[in-house]
Amino acid sequence: MHAYLGIGSNAGDRRSWCANAIVRLTSHPDISSLTQSALYETEPVDAPNQEWFLNCAVGLETALTAQALFSLCTRIERDLGRVRSERNEPRTIDLDLLFYGTELVNTSDLIVPHPRLETRRFVLVPLAEIAPDVRHPVLHLTVRELLDRLGNTPTVRKLDETQQCDE
């Protein structure tokens, strides 16, 4: 199954946290052919007075179910020091399952497609770089069309090549 993840960090060595998460994903035996967007520096949303985020998107082929992929993401977050105590708190790493093929998932701990994906420039800008023509299975719009519907705020700034992750 082809899946897309959003990756972000706004605490500590943000670039290193993102790179470590990507290495852990690519080293999993049930994940192959990972594609990564550039890193983007993004203004925090719903989190005033916090450091800016680094965000990217990845596409991957996986034999894992959506729930198993979500569990892997949660385990990677925990292993990389993420502590969930308050909503919108600074985080070493954040891994969000955005799309899992065209499947719809709605369980107590997982909703796919991600329920706020279409309102988040910090998700859509990097995702549009690697998957502009992927269609939202509920809204029936492509990632590019979803992005075009949003304004230009908050700020999402692509880092130059010297600032990207070296996996």
Image (spheres, rainbow, N blue to C red):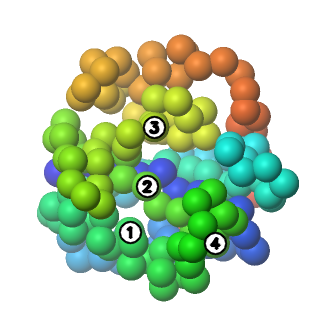
Please tell me which residue is depicted at 25% across the width and 26% down the height of the picture. 138
For mark 2, does the 10 Å Cα neighbourhood hold few (<14), some (14 to 19), or many (20 or more) residues? Answer: many
In this rendering, the answer to whether 70 lies above or below 76 is above
Q: Secondary structure at mark 3?
A: loop
Q: Are marks 2 and 1 in contact (CB under 8 Å)?
A: yes
- The Cα–Cα distance between marks 3 and 4, rounded to whole angstroms, is 21 Å
Q: Which residue is mark 1?
A: 73
Q: Pinpoint residue 48: horizontal percent, then vertical percent.
A: 79, 49
In the drawing, does residue 132 fall left or right of residue 158? left
Q: Which residue is mark 2?
A: 96
Q: Secondary structure at mark 2?
A: strand
Q: Comparing marks 3 and 1, which lies closer to the viewer? A: 3
Please tell me which residue is depicted at 16% across the width and 61% down the height of the picture. 65
Q: Pinpoint residue 115: horizontal percent, then vertical percent.
A: 38, 39
- The answer to which image quadrant residue 157 occupies is top right
Q: Which residue is mark 4?
A: 92
Q: Nearer the viewer, residue 127 or 48?
A: 48
- Amino acid at circle 4: Thr
- Amino acid at circle 1: Cys
- The Cα–Cα distance between marks 3 and 1, rounded to whole angstroms, is 18 Å
Please tell me which residue is depicted at 71% across the width and 37% down the height of the picture. 156
Q: Which residue is mark 3?
A: 116
Q: Pinpoint residue 89: horizontal percent, then vertical percent.
A: 66, 64
- The Cα–Cα distance between marks 4 and 1, rounded to whole angstroms, is 13 Å
- The answer to which image quadrant residue 132 occupies is top left
In the drawing, does residue 73 fall left or right of residue 3? right
Please tell me which residue is depicted at 31% across the width and 40% down the height of the picture. 113
Q: Are marks 3 and 2 in contact (CB under 8 Å)?
A: no
For mark 3, does the 10 Å Cα neighbourhood hold few (<14), some (14 to 19), or many (20 or more) residues? Answer: few
